[in-house]
Amino acid sequence: MRKLLLVIIGLALLGFGGYRQFAGAGVSAADQARCEEQVRAQSGTDAEALALLLPKCSDTGMVAMMDAQASGDDAQAAARRISQANQGDLTAHLVDWAMIGAGLAALAAAAALNRRRA
């Protein structure tokens, strides 16, 4: 019974942490669209700049930078805004990886219990 509970908890943590890390959205669709619109407005028809900057709009730091430019923030305010966005992104990644690690630990504990009984 204990082994089964550990397997269920391990798979749940592993699945949820993996989903949040790899499939979960770090940037909302609205934020990404706003960033892409701002990049297009600033880059105009420069294909090289568009090809370089548009894919980066899925990054929270890039969204914060474009918002800072759009609102006319000075350099210190822009740096604070980008730092806060990156700090939140880092915290989310740490939580995701902690769940993945706890899930793997629970599965390893279940395997160890299985070996003792066998």
Image: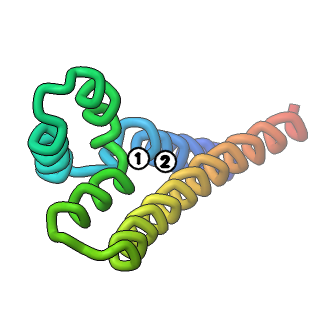
Amino acid residing under circle 1: Arg
Asked whether, in this view, residue 56 is left or right of residue 43, the answer is: right
Residue appearing at x 19%, y 26% in the figure: 46
Q: Is residue 8 above or below residue 76?
A: above
Q: Which residue is mark 1?
A: 20
Question: Quarter of the image holding residue 89?
Answer: bottom left
Q: Nearer the viewer, residue 107 or 42?
A: 42
Asked whether, in this view, residue 5 is left or right of residue 67, the answer is: right
Residue appearing at x 35%, y 54% in the figure: 60
Helix, strand or loop at label 1? It is: helix
Question: How is the protein colored in the picture?
Answer: rainbow
Q: Which residue is mark 2?
A: 17
- How far from the left and from the top, in percent, is residue 42? 16, 44
For residue 36, say whether it is visible.
yes
Helix, strand or loop at label 2? It is: helix
Residue appearing at x 12%, y 26% in the figure: 45
Asked whether, in this view, residue 58 is left or right of residue 29, the answer is: right
